[in-house]
Amino acid sequence: MAGGAVPDRVPRLPRGVRLHDDRVRACRVLLGPERALMLDEVGAAILDEVDGMQSLSVISARLAARYLAPEAEIRADVEVFLTDLAERRLVEWSDA
Amino acid sequence: MPEGVLPPPPPPIALLAELTHRCPLSCPYCSNPTELVARAAELDTAEWVRLFREAAEMGVLQLHLSGGEPASRRDLETLVAEARSAGLYVNLVTSGIGLTEARLDRLEAAGLDHVQLSLQGVRADISDRIGGLTGGFERKIAVARSVVARGLPLTLNAVMHRQNLDDLEATIALAVELGARRIEVACVQFHGWAMLNRGALMPTREQTDRAKRIVADARDRLRGRLVIDFVPPDWHADLPKACMGGWGSTGLNIAPDGTVLPCHGAASIPGLVFPNVRQVSLAWAWAESAAFNAFRGTAWMPEPCRSCDRRAVDHGGCRCQAMAVLGDARAPDPVCRRTPGRAALDRLLADALASDSGLTMRAPPR
């Protein structure tokens, strides 16, 4: 990764927020306080990478490799998705 | 599909389990019915555990363990552990009274996901007066601090009305100071006990308008720190709320004796026979029972709801409110200014605002 011009951050699911396999609706769900967000394939793929250790850059690179897509584009999408969840206190950021 | 037959309902997302109607508080707006269930009639541990498994199999994701005060049940820790092992997200809806450190230790170990703590007021004087328990506020705050110190997510459920809505800014500030992740600014909805006390609790129009501005400002200012959910006082609204997201569409309640209800207030509606899990499965109650199908879809609706452009938005509003105000659960929600029932609601509203009656506190179960 190039010299850290863009600060990297590590997303994690705070306690009380977790991913759930919904067998009845055949989807993944993000469960938190008074919230149940049904995830599409993209949302589930991002949150499956959120383990509290991998940084935004690492997660983006992995997803870019898996979906054969430009890393910058993936990173922008991942950041928007996780920032929205952070504003709803379903994701927390820490410094890389 | 034959004409006149409803499609099967989507699976419910949330189950509110009223484990008991026993409670150390006696709030005059309690959401329990005015006819409380006695301890001897409560479902036992095994019955609740069976229900949690049935609920998870049906597609329920969120379990709200409520009451009364759920900590009045000595098997609360067992119920939390069993609900978690059934795959449910377990939320404890509590007054905080009775939650000692030792009990919180055990609930945490059992896998409790989230604590929703009720708040009757932002200071001891009003909190203890509304809750009817001296020292209650101090104990609540201690529980809030302990929950946050453990790293468990905390929601403050601030129940607001004429006597405390002017403290809204201080209430939000308290949530921030305590480290709550979320606050529900839950303005009292006027059914049951609250309807009896409307003369003391009905907020003014000015309080309501100010509360909306305070919430909008706080949401902006506290984005990413505090999630704010707001239930406005609907008697000051022009259009009805989408009560429960529609009758029998997203969630269900189980009363302490096993009666299955679409919402807290539904038992107030005469003529409906609510199923009981001592006789039927939860899945049957949800999908097949006449009571759960009574107000699904649009075929039940009277005019002007049936041809209204908002019928899929608010589903005709709240059935219990139509019952309480108009004496007819099939009528349009009288909050709606497009309906003739609004005149009756306006008369009750004016009377309530002109009144300064004292509080009738909730009585204990027999």
Image (tube, coloured by chain):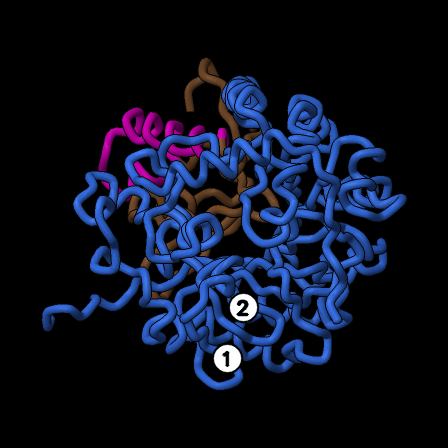
Residue visible at 75% across and 59% down? B363
Q: Main secondary structure of the magenta part?
A: helix
What letter labels the chain drawn in blue?
B
| Chain on which label 1 sits | B
The kind of secondary structure element at disc 2 is strand
Q: In the rendering, at what x and y percent does residue B252 appear?
A: 46, 62
Q: Quadrant of residue B34?
A: bottom right
Q: What percent of the width, then of the height, locates residue A32?
A: 52, 47
As drawn, is B92 to the left or to the right of B103?
left
Position of residue B154 in the picture relative to residue B124 (left or right): left
Residue that lies at the very extreme toward the bottom in this rendered image: B279
| Residues tagged by mark 2 and mark 1 found on one chain of the structure | yes
Pointer 2 with pointer 1, Cβ within 8 A: yes
Look at the image and say whether residue A80 sits in the magenta stretch: yes
The residue that label 2 is drawn on is: B254
* Amino acid at the residue labelled 2: Ile
Q: Chain of mark 2?
A: B
Query: Is residue A91 visible from the viewing direction of this image?
Result: no
Toward the viewer: B282 or A11?
B282
Q: Is residue B128 left or right of residue A53?
A: right
- The foreground one among A38 and A11 is A38
Task: Kindly identify which residue carries mark 1.
Answer: B277
* Residue segment shown in magenta: A60-87
Q: Quadrant of residue B13?
A: bottom left
Tally of numbered tags: 2
Q: Is residue A48 above or below residue B296?
A: above
Looking at the figure, which quarter contains the C terminus of chain B? bottom right
Question: Residue B75: percent from the left, percent from the top?
Answer: 73, 72
Q: Residue furthest top?
A: A5
- Chain that appears brown: A
Q: Position of residue B243 (x, y in %)?
A: 41, 48
> Looking at the image, is A77 positioned above or below residue B41?
above
